[in-house]
Image: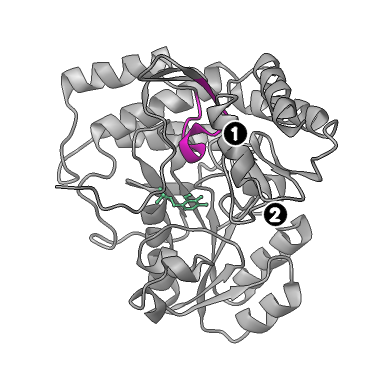
Amino acid sequence: MNLFEVYPLYNVTPVSAKGIVVKDEKGQEYLDFYGGHAVISIGHSHPHYLRRIKEQLDKIGFYSNAVQNPLQSELAEKLGQLSGCGDYNLFLCNSGAEANENALKMASFQTGKSRVIAFKNGFHGRTSAAVAATDNEKINAPINKQQKVTILPLNDIESFKSEIQKGDVCGVIIEAIQGVGGLDEPSTKFYQEVAELCKKNNAILIADEVQSGFGRSGKFFGFQHHGIQPDIISIAKGMGNGFPVGGTLIHESIKATYGMLGTTFGGNHLACAATMAVLEVLEDEKLIKNAEKLGAYFRKKAVEIPQVKRVKGRGLMLGLEFDFEVAELRKKLIYDQHLFTGGAKDKRVLRILPALNITEKHLDIFFERLKQELK
Ligand SMILES: Cc1ncc(COP(=O)(O)O)c(C=O)c1O
């Protein structure tokens, strides 16, 4: 059997990884400034993470959601405490798309309505409603186009107002920092007005924190830079540091009924152990503060490079905008400089999403090698 080829692959085969270093089968080391699409939050093979998962596996790796699993409540407690979102309830799933799919479904259950507002260049996943809310025609099949979604320009409050006032919108989904799109952000004024208009028009505000969450932006959640409170928050990626896990945080004003959401694998024992390990390391090693500090250091170094037109993002969710498309540069960075970086829908943006425990020394190496390629 062959693989169903949907990914254009770089010719690199990682076989081991530790911290920020990834090694291929020939022993070549690469520095990972991308974390496999913002997934590696506490570094590859963090010792506490390995210990937590191994210990859990020795006890029990999985049982379904038909029985008690106290690890889920422990995780919810810790997540509430570290994120400052104790007044939400947690539903665990397996990926970012699923987290958003559940969020959109809850918005519809709660309001009895079905139209969604999403934003230009947003990315929310590849499942039914999530992909329909994603601004990319190419990944929407005819079956997805049945969903009622209106995609509006980010930061254009007048167009938002005229759509939401029609009264048929169940949910508004928004990223605090657009990941796949290329690091554009809603302004604080826009985000706050959106939040207020959602309340006035009985629509659920969904903060898609799949990429910007778990400390990456320098605060636990990206929306916390803007002083708003969403009704629902979706999480995944950095949450499991590579273990597939996602979640939907649903404000306690929205009530659960049995069967309204469900999953076989979501919230399994191993996923809980992995996420607990991530939260413990974020707290013990003060990594959210580190993300903020290192983000500022990155910015300082980046503006010294004449080819960089703009530094985008916050904390360690960063983008360098050039006045040329970066695909070739990314190839050279990986093959010649042995650096993993990312691209974006905006082809001029080089995305930088390292583990939150990187150091200034790592960033110095990154900029030295980048400068060599830009010479
Ligand atoms: C903001 C955002 N939401 C949702 C997703 C989908 O997550 P997943 O690939 O885990 O389904 C992504 C993935 O890139 C994302 O960046």
Query: In this rendering, does residue 71 appear at all?
Result: no
Mark 1 vs ligand 1: CB under 8 Å? Answer: no
95 w.r.t. 73: above or below: below
Asked whether, in this view, residue 9 is left or right of residue 199, the answer is left
Q: Quadrant of the C terminus?
A: top right
Secondary element at image label 2: loop
Mark 1 nearby-residue class (10 Å; few <14, some 14–19, many ≥20): some
Determine crowd level at label 2: few under 14, some 14-19, many 20+ residues with C-alpha closer than 10 A: many
Horizontal placement of 88 versus 257: left or right? right
Indicate left or right for 302 with 13 as reference.
Answer: right
Q: Which residues are magenta?
A: 30-42
In this rendering, position of residue 15 left or right of residue 68: right
Q: Amino acid at mark 1?
A: Lys
Q: Image quarter for residue 11? A: top left
Location of residue 135 with respect to 267 vertically, above or below:
below
Query: Residue at 56% across / 52% down in the picture?
Result: 180
Total numbered circles? 2
1 or 2: tag closer to the N-terminus: 2
Residue under label 2, please give it: 185
Give 228 or 7, whichever is nearer the viewer.
7
Q: Residue at left 68%, top 35%?
A: 315
Query: Which residue is tagged 1?
Result: 332
